[in-house]
Image (cartoon, coloured by chain):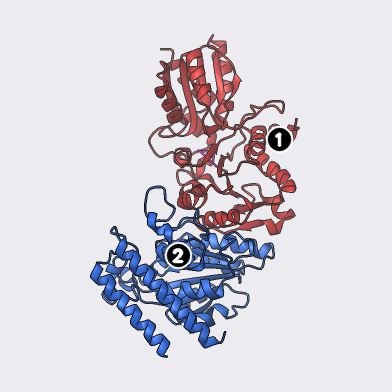
Amino acid sequence: MKNNNQYLNLSSRDAYGIALFNQAELNKTIVAVTADVPDSVRFSKFRENWPERFFNFGIAEQNMMGAAAGLAREGKTPFVSVYAIFAAMRAIEQLRTDIAYPKLPVRICVSHSGISLGQAGPTHHSIEDISILRSIANMVVIAPADGISTAMALDVISNYDGPVYLRLSRAVEPTVYSSSMVYKFGRANIVREGKDITIIAYGASVGNSLIAAKKLSQEGIEATVIDMAFIKPIDKNAIIKAANETGRILTVEESTIIGGLGSAVAEVLAEANATVVFKRLGIPDQYTLAGSYDALQRHYNLDPDGIATESRALFK
Amino acid sequence: MTNSDQILTLSQRALDYREHIIKLAHTQNFGVHVGGSLSLAEVFTTLYFDAANLDPKNPTWQNRDRIVLSKGHGNVGLLTILAMKGFFPFSVFENFNEVGSHYSMHSDAEVPGVEHSAGSLGHGLSVAVGMALVAKTDMQPWQVYCIMGDGEMMEGSVWEAMMSASHFKLNNLNAIIDRNRLCQEGTTAETMDLEPLMEKSRAFGWSVFEVDGHSIRELLDAFSADSGEKPKLIITNTIKGRGIHSLENQTKSHFAHLTEEQAQLAIEQINNERNILVQD
């Protein structure tokens, strides 16, 4: 088994930079593509080592995304990294029509997702990306929980012949994984088992949900926590099994509650005729506020205390 | 082949191309993008039968020149020239626009010889930039051609691509603008003025040539001209609907169905032009 200890306790973003570099040493078709933010997306070492494989398109994301399609058409494996919102919204038509429609192997690995760019406010928050990307055919959508699982996700998709949206954070997420854990394409990972409620999350919300589960345990509520890093394709069996076993499901995500993980889980539950107490926790149907990441997580109940509060409410 | 023989042959092919488009515009009751396909007759003919290095028997040949049609609504033109070149038989048009057919209104990369699907405007040049970057960094011999509509130049993404092509010194990239001065529902001048297009393009770092887009001789010269370290832009002044008197230079030529009478008149016009070519 591959030793992933070097990624332990790293943020998803830092782990991405290292894991990409390691892959690029072996796979010479990999090129790095960005739009004025190479250091922010951890391309610095890649750029120093392989300047001829690094392309900075300046502050012009639409052209960057279209050019990535051209690079992929000619045999390259582009890793396109910018802030989430500018990939998922500014350049969405190029992503959809030029990359996803022809199923080109472009890895759109975005940083600064969700509300992790706190003080920068709603112009820089990316709360719609999961909902948008999930609706695009041919897309694989992954949001790893921490550094190690980011490296594992990159490993899992390394031979995937199609487009992938990999959602990274600006923040340092709570560590969830150890290097002995296993990651499979399209599979949910149960990171804690309990009989009373299931919390399904992705990204930083997985670690926060684990901390919340420990708090709940002290009160006698035992929670299963599922890392649904693969939002698409989604692991239907894991959702139905969790509903049958715990009868209560809370989805947690740093995204709008419309169309994201919560909606995806609800679709699975409804079509399976599952009888379950259910709630979507995320950003309500409104624009986010500006403020520190920690304060915003508290504000939207996405911190461990908030997740515990929302969980308790499902027992009333 | 002498230069004048070459021009005669290409001119005859351009008329053959027009005849195909006219017949298609007649047989397809739904209509086709006739105007912007006819304006490209000489551009396509010169590019596919002279300038570009292609092998219709091996559409994915590694050293082929890449041709990206960014104005994807010129697809009946693209399909016609590809069929003429031998990429596939003309019989593909029997299922044109049918559910499941890759031969339809907009260009589809599932079709042999089509490098990238297009339809939404302002995308092709960026894709061509990516392709040209690969050829340049991997020291490949092939050229990249990108055919755009002039109305398409209103899209901001095109100018992002223009900027990046000169920034990366992509002198293996050749863009062609079909300057027929009409977009879907009006003239480019009244819709969103593009002028001074040549000066703007030069200011963006391109080597710019302006030619009569219906002159094979001028097109041959422009395709073979040296652009130095810069990407090359050829502004081809054309007439939308060229070859059908009743539609020439009119917005209604953009998408049309031809009646039996219109088609017959247009083919007579083509035959007259054929006779004039031979007499010259």
Q: Quadrant of the C terminus of chain A?
A: top left
* Residue A61 x, y percent position in the rendering: 52, 55
Q: Residue at x 63, y 57 (%)?
A: A55
Q: Quadrant of the N terminus of chain A?
A: top right
Chain A hue?
A: red
Q: Residue at x 67, y 65 (%)?
A: B140
Q: Which residues are magenta?
A: A112-116
User: In the rendered image of this protein, does residue A244 appear above or below residue A200?
Assistant: above
Check residue A108 for magenta coloring.
no
Check residue A115 for magenta coloring.
yes
Q: Could you classify mark 1 by the number of other residues whose Cα lies within 10 Å: few (under 14), some (14-19), or many (20 or more)?
A: many
Q: Is residue A234 left or right of residue A181?
A: left
Q: Is residue A111 left or right of residue A22?
A: left
Give the residue at mark 2: B78
Tag shown at residue A7: 1
Q: What's under tag 2, amino acid-wise?
A: Leu
Q: Residue at x 23, y 71 (%)?
A: B261
Provide the chain ID for the residue under circle 2. Answer: B
Q: What's under tag 1, amino acid-wise?
A: Tyr
**What is the secondary structure assignment of the residue under circle 1?**
helix
